[in-house]
Image (spheres, helix red, strand yellow):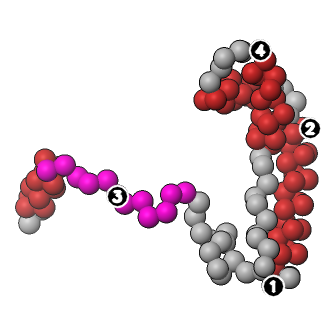
Amino acid sequence: MSEKPKRPLSAYMLWLSSAREQIKKENPGIKVTEIAKKGGELWRAMKDKSEWEAKAAQAKENYEEAVKDFEANGGSTANGGGSAKKRGKAGKKPAKKSKKAESEDEDDDDESD
């Protein structure tokens, strides 16, 4: 069975992928993180983003069509993927409280009685 189609890129990401080389040329030796920062600054300063927003809208339509085809051909979101599943790190545990924070919480509980 084929894989579920990947989500389409946003207008910003489409623009950044086309502008990345130009940013590198204008700023020799720039770090990857700095390229992203510079790209964000340039994107925010852009007045007319309609070209990129149109490309993103077209990519989204193509994606939605591909998902329909995928599901019509027996593709299923039940085996791992799915829109209900949240993106991000899986199994991330909550941060542990310090001993001091734990004792303060216990103090707060005592006062409420």
Return the residue at label 2: 51
Q: Position of residue 39 (x, y in %)?
A: 72, 28
- Rate crowding at label 3 as few (under 14), some (14 to 19) or many (20 or more) other CA atoms within 10 Å: few
State which mark lies toward you, 2 or 4: 4
Q: Is residue 104 left or right of residue 89?
A: left
Q: CA distance from mark 1 to mark 3?
A: 37 Å
Disc number for residue 26? 4
Secondary element at tag 2: helix
Q: Is residue 52 left or right of residue 20?
A: right
Quadrant in which residue 82 is drawn: bottom right
Whether residue 7 appears in magenta in the rendering, the answer is: no
State which mark lies toward you, 1 or 3: 1
Quadrant in which residue 46 is drawn: top right
Residue 21 higher or lower than 110, as above or below? above
Return the residue at label 1: 74
Mark 4 is on which residue type?
Glu
Secondary element at tag 3: loop
Secondary element at tag 1: loop
Secondary element at tag 4: helix
Mark 1 is on which residue type?
Gly
Count numbered badges in the picture: 4
Whether residue 94 appears in magenta in the rendering, the answer is: yes
Return the residue at label 3: 94
Do the numbered discs 1 and 3 sit on residues whose CB atoms are within 8 Å?
A: no
Q: Position of residue 97 (x, y in %)?
A: 23, 52
Q: Residue placed farthest to the bottom in the image? A: 74
Q: Earlier in the sequence, mark 3 or mark 4?
A: 4
Q: Which residues are magenta?
A: 88-99
- Rate crowding at label 4 as few (under 14), some (14 to 19) or many (20 or more) other CA atoms within 10 Å: few
Mark 2 is on which residue type?
Glu
